[in-house]
DNA sequence: CTGAAAGCGCTTACAG
DNA sequence: CTGAAAGCGCTTACAG
């Protein structure tokens, strides 16, 4: 059967195409009876308007893009990205938008990405994940394109871009301050890549907490890592000779790998080395280890990012948007569990989860 | 500046819009000089044709959908789905298509999904992940819609659908046969959900291998699980009283949780209980544990699924497409490592990876 | 090889 | 409140 068009509906309801269009678009200036009649025909026929035709005339496609640049091909091992995708998807479901996902699997993909993403008539706007130095060209292009663009995570160079982030400096400082409160004197850190804003900011928070506490800065205690479990494992091995009694890992996966290395070296966590991670990913290892960590609301972050973008799309003259989301310290076994008020000792159930928030 | 249209390019190149369109669409019937002139104008202006206009007239949007139904909201804890997404994305990048991702986060989302996905003019076709019983309505609707639909994973009920799958029965049988070859006599299994084709098929493979080996079927040795780590942990605890000496877990995460429970119960893996998983997910736990498992090529599976769909789109009268991808047994420490030819004992590096393929 | 014209299926001033 | 008409930016027979 041929596809139904506005014309067919108009004919069957004995009105003009204009009126059918008004009904579909909830134009209030339609007679109640007329509206009811048209709606009945639409219901009976199961008519849906053609999205391409609407996009052409309205200059709005009802689709937003989520761009994950090349450096994010770690997408797979780190649950962060599926959660981000979930958040953006939730917002799209709620606002009846379509989510187009762009994953640059290679440098070549990335080069083609800008042209594909900015095809006219395709997207109404784009959320782009801030990445490493190598991704900044793409971000620069997007931010300066005709397309409304929201950067997820502080962009490294685009000082005028709208973005959403967490306060990584404050969060890292909160984590390290907790290690200090737990009595650690030689606190090491396994950083994220120094090429990424996240890596830079969390390292700065580490420094800041040490300075505030009057503790010395020791370069031996800082090792650059890469947010992976293996990176954490290797990084912790490299730290052993510096004999830390505390460790701030820039991600949960890093912390998990580090703890594996520490235990292999015969050290107890938290007895010999207290450990704090970052993310609070809902993965079994985090709860199995009882990892003390910084919780960031990744799904909500994605939701909010998408909604900020929708705001920019609806209101193109809107001034620059910036949002910083809250994080919280989640205290579990690897650092500070014994400090919790009312802690009853080893009889606590393995999965009890208590929080202290250093604000 | 106003957006450029075909008309502007035509004017600047002193040709008609038709000719510009032909150049853009690589129509061979264009004079070489004319073509060069038009191409130069396009290059100089950075013109890109409007996707909505093209979609409207050509009835092809250049976008395919990837639909992950409600039961797949486990998306996040299981790395399977990000890998599938990556595969579909790779195929889209390669074939210059756009991937729209639909994630049904709730039963309500799922109800709205069909209408959103089948909006006319939006998608050229859709890959839908086969899920549980509750998802079969959506799959039924999609398969019977105007939209070319490829089901990823054997659909439970749609007997005429095009789909891609692995041979779960054979793969599971291969896993259990390996446990038998390693000397196990009481082989337990932690299944996937009995509501899913994967769960059903892998259980059947388990039975098949036992029957072929002349081993008895003991209902105590079969516990239904859910593909999660926690499910594996709890499932293994429930199996303890049946005293298995081998365990086939229907997913890697299940196996990982099960091994945790077995070790907590004071049992050695593989000494007391040999374990085989399923998936060979590239996650640290799999390699840390040295998990013997069935490797399935998830990314390639996604690539192939998308390419099959593209085939269906290009050739709408194409007969039903079915593809079964190969799996292989990956032997590591949790079962059969000592059987490997040339195995040198405990001095093997922890990450050596050797394969035996029972075909 | 090239151009004028029709048409894809909508939305939206403009009249009434 | 309603309809006729123009137009969104392309592609594609149809002529030449």
Image (tube, coloured by chain):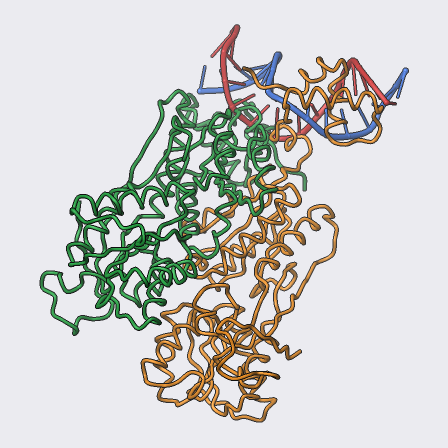
Chain colours: A orange, B green, C blue, D red
Q: Nearer the viewer, residue A201 or A117?
A: A201
Residue visible at 38% across and 28% down in the picture = B159
Tell me where residue A43 appears, x and y as whole percent: 68, 24
Task: Give the vertical position of B229 relative to A258 (above or below).
Answer: above
Q: Image quadrant for the N terminus of chain A?
A: top right
| Residue appearing at x 53%, y 25% in the figure | B59
- Where does the image place residue A193, in percent across and percent down from the top left? 45, 70
Say whether residue A311 is left or right of residue B251: right
Q: Name the residue nearer the viewer: B312 or B353.
A: B353
Q: Position of residue A353 (x, y in %)?
A: 55, 72
Q: Is residue A242 left or right of residue A303?
A: left
Q: How many marks?
A: 0
Answer with the quarter of the image where residue A38 lies: top right
> Horizontal placement of A320 versus B193: left or right?
right
Assign the C terminus of chain A to one quadrant of the image.
Answer: bottom right
* Figure check: A229 above or below B47: below
Residue B88 x/y as whole percent: 42, 43
Nearest to the observer: residue A320 or residue B160: B160
* Residue A314 against residue B275 in the figure, above or below: above
**Quarter-wise, where is residue A226 in the image?**
bottom left
């Amino acid at each position: 059967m041929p596809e139904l068009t506005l014309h067919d509906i108009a004919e069957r309801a004995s009105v003009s195409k204009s009126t059918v269009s008004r009904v579909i678009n909830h134009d209030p200036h339609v007679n109640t009876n007329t509206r009811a009649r048209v709606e009945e025909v639409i219901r009976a026929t199961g008519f849906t308007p053609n999205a391409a035709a609407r996009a052409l005339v309205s200059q709005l496609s009802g689709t937003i893009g989520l761009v994950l640049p090349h450096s994010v091909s770690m997408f797979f091992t780190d649950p962060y990205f599926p959660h981000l995708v979930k958040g953006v998807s939730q917002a799209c479901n709620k606002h009846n938008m379509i989510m187009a996902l762009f994953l640059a699997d290679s440098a070549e993909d990335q080069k083609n990405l800008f042209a594909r993403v900015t095809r006219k008539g395709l997207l109404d706007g784009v959320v782009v994940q801030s990445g490493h130095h190598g991704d900044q060209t793409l971000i620069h292009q997007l931010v300066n394109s005709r397309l409304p663009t929201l950067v997820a995570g502080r962009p490294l160079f685009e000082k005028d871009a709208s973005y959403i982030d967490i306060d990584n400096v404050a969060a890292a400082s909160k984590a390290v301050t907790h290690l200090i409160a737990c009595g650690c004197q030689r606190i090491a850190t396994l950083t994220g890549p120094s090429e990424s804003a996240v890596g830079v900011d969390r390292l700065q928070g580490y420094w800041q907490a040490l300075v505030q506490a009057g503790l010395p800065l020791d370069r031996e205690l800082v090792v650059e890592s890469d947010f992976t479990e293996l990176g954490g494992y290797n990084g912790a091995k490299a730290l052993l000779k510096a004999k830390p009694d505390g460790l701030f890992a820039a991600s949960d996966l890093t912390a998990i790998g580090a703890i594996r290395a520490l235990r292999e070296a015969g050290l107890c966590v938290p007895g010999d080395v207290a450990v704090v991670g970052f993310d609070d990913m809902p993965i079994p290892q985090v709860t199995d280890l009882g990892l003390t960590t910084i919780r960031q609301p990744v799904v909500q972050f994605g939701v909010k990012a998408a909604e900020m973008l929708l705001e920019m799309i609806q209101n193109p003259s809107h001034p620059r948007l910036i949002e910083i989301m809250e994080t919280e310290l989640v205290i579990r076994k690897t650092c500070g569990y014994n400090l919790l008020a009312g802690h009853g000792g080893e009889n606590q159930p393995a999965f009890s989860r208590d929080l202290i928030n250093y604000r």
